[in-house]
């Protein structure tokens, strides 16, 4: 199993952890004197979602960059050096 698959799976399961953390936070805040740490319970899954989401967003661009495929200003199509202008 490759690294990208694990990141994608973690990114898919993190919203469930975030939802549970938010529900627990709302329930705990209804108490008379909730502990202070409950306010920060949703932050770890939220930050992990941010980082995995940014990684997955940049992944196609990084893959294209690493493969060496460059595009020119003709609508994103690869530039064909053998084709002459005006033919």
Image: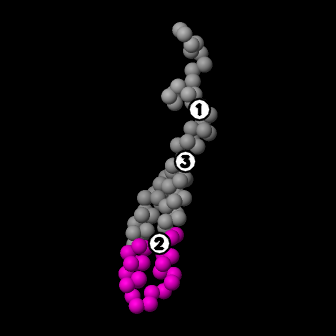
- Checking the image for residue 42, the label placed there is 2
Q: CA distance from mark 3 to mark 1?
A: 16 Å
Can residue 85 be found in the magenta stretch?
A: no
Q: Position of residue 80 (x, y in %)?
A: 57, 20
Describe the element under mark 1 as helix, strand or loop: loop
Tag 1 residue: 69
Describe the element under mark 3 as helix, strand or loop: helix
Q: What main secondary structure does the magenta stretch of the protein show?
A: helix
Circles 1 and 2 in contact, beta carbons < 8 Å: no
Q: Position of residue 34 (x, y in %)?
A: 45, 87
In which quadrant of the rendered view does residue 31 lie? Answer: bottom left
Describe the element under mark 2 as helix, strand or loop: loop
Q: CA distance from mark 3 to mark 2?
A: 25 Å
Residue range of the region highlighted in magenta in the rendering: 21-44
At label 3, counting other C-alpha atoms closer than 10 Å, the crowd grade (few under 14, some 14-19, many 20 or more) is few
Mark closer to the observer (1, 2): 2
Circles 3 and 2 in contact, beta carbons < 8 Å: no
At label 1, counting other C-alpha atoms closer than 10 Å, the crowd grade (few under 14, some 14-19, many 20 or more) is few
On screen, residue 81 above or below 2: above
Residue for point 59% across, 32% down: 69
Could you tell me if residue 1 is visible in this image?
no
Q: How many marks?
A: 3
Can residue 24 be found in the magenta stretch?
A: yes
Circles 3 and 1 in contact, beta carbons < 8 Å: no
Q: CA distance from mark 1 to mark 2?
A: 40 Å
In the image: residue 19, left or right of residue 52 = left
Tag 3 residue: 58
Marked residue nearer the N-terminal end (3 or 1): 3
């Amino acid at each position: 199993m490759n690294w990208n698959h694990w990141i994608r799976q973690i990114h898919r399961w993190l919203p469930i952890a975030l939802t549970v953390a938010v529900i627990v936070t709302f329930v705990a805040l209804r108490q008379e004197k909730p502990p202070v740490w409950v306010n920060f319970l949703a932050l770890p899954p939220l930050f992990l979602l941010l980082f995995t989401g940014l990684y997955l967003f940049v992944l196609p661009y990084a893959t294209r960059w690493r493969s060496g495929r460059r595009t020119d200003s003709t609508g994103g199509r690869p530039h064909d050096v053998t084709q002459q202008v005006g033919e």
